[in-house]
Every structure is written in C-alpha cells, then in structure tokens.
Image (spheres, helix red, strand yellow):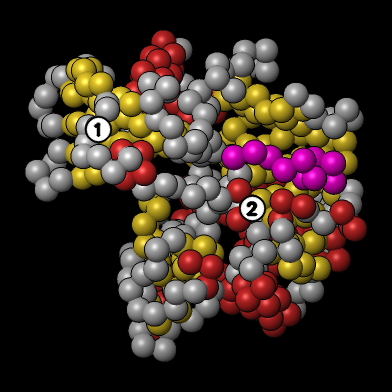
Amino acid sequence: MEEAGPKGLASALTASGALTSDWLPAFEAVPRHLFVPDVIWPGRAGMNRQSDRVVRAEDPEAWWAAVYRDAPITTQWDDGTYTGPGKGKVPSCSNSMPTMVFSMLAELSVEEGHRVLEIGTGTGWNAALLSHRVGAANVVTVEVDEASARAARARLHAAGYEPLTVVGDGAEGFPERAPYDRVIATCSVGSLPRPWITQTRPGGAIVAPWGPVYGGEAVVRLTVAGDGSAAGRFVGSSAFMRLRAQRTARTHVREYLGGRKWPADGVCSMTTLSPDAVGDWHVMFAIGVQVPGAFPWAEAYGDGSYTLWLRDTAVTSWATVDYEPGKAEFEVCQSGPRKLWAEVSAAYHWWEARGRPGFERFGLTVDADGEHVWLDAPGRPVPGV
C-alpha cells in the first residue's frame, strides 16, 4: 500500500481518470495540506458522513492520512457556531473530495488567461488550483462566511497566490470583474442564480452542482448563449452543501400532524412500491424534479424497518410509508391537498418506463421562462418542472 501523501493521491486520481495531465502541474504546485485547517472532520469517499474530529497537534498522522485520502473533509459546522469536540448539527464548510475537485475543473475546460469566477472559496484550495492554471489576476472567488474567507485568503497568500477574494453573497456573483469566461460553484443550488448567467460571456461555461429540494444532485455544465439563456447536460453525481442564500428550513413532523397522534387525519392504504426502490441518489433526482417543494426523511428502527416520511415545504401535506424487510406490500398514509406518495410513485414509474436513466441522460435549460430539466434532448422536458 502506497504511503499517504501527495504522490499517492496523485497516482490514485490519475489511475481513476479524475486527474488529467493538464491539471497535474497544478496539483503538484498546490499541495492540499496547505489548504486544510488543523481541526477537521474527515469524510468518507462517496458518502455524506463525517468521522469524529481530528486535531493535527494531537494526531498528526491521522490528520495527514485524512488530507491525502480521496474523501471530503468537513472544516466547519453550523456556520462556525459549533467548535467543540464531536460533531455539530449541519456541516457548513469543507475541502471537497479530490476526485470531485478535479472532475469539475476538467469540465470547466479552462485555458490560460481565462477569467474565472468561483462561488464558494471554502478553504481556498480550488482557488489556488485555478490561480496556478489561469493566473491569479484572472480569478475572483466569493465566500459568504467572513471567517472562512479570511482564513482562505491567508492560506492563498502563504502559498504565493493573490486572487481577488470577496466576502459576499455568492448568488450575486461579482459584477465588477464581469464578464467571465468560466463560472464554477463549489456549493449546490436548486435554482441557478441569474447573475451567474449575465456575468458570463456568450459562449462561456458554468459548472455547478444542481439538485431539487427532494434530494438527488448532480454537476451540470451549461453553455451561455447570446440571448441570455444557458443549457447543458448533467455530468455526474455530487453532494455539496447548499448555497447559503438557498437553504431551506425543514419543519418538524409535529407541525404537519397539528398536535395529533399519527396518523391524525391521514388516509391509509397499501402499496406494492417499496420505499427502498425510491432511495438511490439518481432516483431521488428524477423524482425531485417532478415533485417540487417536497422532501423525504427516514425514521429508522432497530429491526431494519423504517418509516419514510414525505413532507411539503408549504406545510400542507404529508405522507408516510412503512417499510418492513421481506414484505411485498407496505402501508401508506397520506394527508393534505397533495398526495405525496402518489406523486412520488408516478414520478418513479415515469423514470422506470424510460429505462431508469442515470444523471448523464438529463440536462438543464435556464431561460426567460425559468428552469427546465430535460431527458436526452432539450425538446423532451421532464414533467413537473
């Protein structure tokens, strides 16, 4: 087994195809450890879960191994309000999984001299890689969290890079330096901010993680047209923290039940569609673009069974589906004007009837009429959006 370090990570990323020859010099010039703070919560590859806190001074070997593992690293919880041991409630800043970093940079297709706008400075690693590739004078990076921006600016300076680092709402972009040849977001959105398009020159590209409220998310690469629209395909699964301006609060189930005991006024029936069938990330994406303003939550029990809760953001409707291992039918209860399980079932069957498409068959168009997710071609819109 190769020792943890830059060479080992470079070998793994090169072998997987994530790190291409044109980005290898930037990887070697901008080592990840220069952009990782001393207190971290290592993640696991392909999973949105964090391990316990690692403090560099207490366990330098574990810290180093985490830095040079192909996995994300959480660097802040709860917008910085949680700083203790263990974990906070919601991760709010990270150093992204290296495979994701270089896959997105590859999709950006930058050339020397390109003007690049980055949304979400984070720890500064991505901005440093871009600065090495296109020149720091051509990079603008925007971060909403002042403490994160200040720390990233210090790391960038120490590494010899001076891109323009801006503290502000990434949804607004940075019009003072527009137009940009490329825009890249290191946070996810459910609606592409209009300034990102208007600040990109015609023919320029935007690379951003996009996902519905329901769940499921993928990176989309959009090309901006002269009429102010943008369109392109999804290029791969992702799981990023939401742009702060687009975060949504999730109301507790008690508010939906109105203080009554479940199933309250819910109408119950049986379904043959298993809750397990609708839980994969790409399936959630296909469902989410057809079932707007709704989200799931699984209440797990110790015996392998669970209740899938569905709720709408307007707090008018809810549904539950009880999963039990080995069963062929599952109890459903629904309440409110929206029959959420019926909506989810219809969306699932639409997806199944079209050959169970993955992310790569979907695309997104953003124009004066809004956002349109399509399957295979722009003229084939997904219903419900």
Secondary structure type for disc 1: loop
Q: Quadrant of the N terminus?
A: bottom left
The three-letter amino acid code for the residue at tag 1 is Ala
Q: Quadrant of the C terminus?
A: top right
**Where is residue 141 drawn, in percent x and y?**
74, 62
Find disc 2 in the rendering and name its residue: 245
Residue closest to the eye, 115 or 12 = 115
Magenta-span inclusion, residue 191: yes
Identify the residue at image location x=25%, y=40%: 260
Secondary structure type for disc 2: helix
Vertical side of 276 occupied by 375: above or below:
above
Magenta region: 190-199
Identify the residue at image location x=38%, y=51%: 47
Find disc 1 in the rendering and name its residue: 264
* 248 with respect to 139 (left or right): left
Q: Is residue 276 visible?
A: no
* 281 with respect to 24 (left or right): left
